Amino acid sequence: MPAVTVPDITLLPRVSVADLLTEKPRPVVSLTTAPSGFEGEGFPVRRAFMGAPLNLIDPFIMLDQLGEVEYAPGEPKGTPWHPHRGFETVTYIIDGIFDHRDSNGGGGRITNGDTQWMTAGGGILHIETPPESLVMSGGLFHGFQLWVNLPRAKKWSPPAYQDIRSKEVKLLASTDGGALARCTPSVAHAGVPRSSSTISRPAASAVFTRASSSAEGTHCSGASG
């Protein structure tokens, strides 16, 4: 169950319809099933972009679904210390808790509906672990992590870290009221304004969306069908 939601999507403000005369959606190249595997100390993932040509997914590098898994007491797992450089990681927790620490002094705890935005820039070591209380109790863990490439001129930027709390997420409905869009506020890392959005919609439907950001906030628009 998504952590940030509403009982009735149809009561939310609607995203505007994209102007298909000036904004051409990317065509669907292929439909694939994300392969399953394990990351870190052994938590399950599904890697959506596995094997996809980078020119088709740019500026994205990787998209992992974390879980969904119901841990028994003693089972929750995280990652050991590991390096990143030249890109950003965006981690969204739907259910569960993750603690983060890095070699730049950044860190914090993200839980239901929170987003962790880390700019690796010129290089960083970081670690993500479940808190001791979750290890003791077990429980549901579910989220996703997106890797976003930095422009060539920004790849050696100083590392940075930011938490975006669930209360900051803006909820919108698609034009037909059939999809729920969660839009994070605009953040700027390495001098590059960023925003992100997630879409919840029945699997039999499709939705075209656009999210743009500026220093003042987040703008989401789209068309569904």
Image (tube, rainbow, N blue to C red):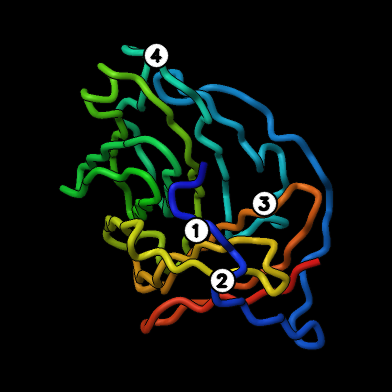
**Considering only order in the chain, which callout, 3 or 1, is on the residue closer to the N terminus?**
1
From what the image shows, is residue 27 above or below residue 97?
A: below
The image position of residue 17, as x and y in percent, is 71, 81
**Do the numbered discs 4 and 1 sit on residues whose CB atoms are within 8 Å?**
no
Label 1: how many Cα within 10 Å (few below 14, some 14–19, many 20+): few
What is the x, y in percent for residue 52? 72, 44
Q: Which residue is mark 3?
A: 54
C-alpha gap between disc 4 and disc 1: 29 Å
Instruction: Please tell me which of labels 2 and 1 falls first in the chain.
Output: 1
Residue 87 % position (x, y): 44, 54
Q: Is residue 151 visible?
A: no
**Residue bearing the label numbered 1:** 6
- Going from N to C along the chain, the mark reached first, 4 or 2, is 2
Q: Which residue in the structure is indicated by mark 4? A: 72
Q: Which residue is mark 2?
A: 11
Q: Nearer the viewer, residue 104 or 225?
A: 225
Between circles 4 and 1, the one closer to the viewer is: 1
Q: Nearer the viewer, residue 120 or 130?
A: 130
On screen, residue 203 above or below 126: below
Dot 2 falls on a residue whose secondary structure is helix
Of 124 and 97, the residue lying toward us: 97
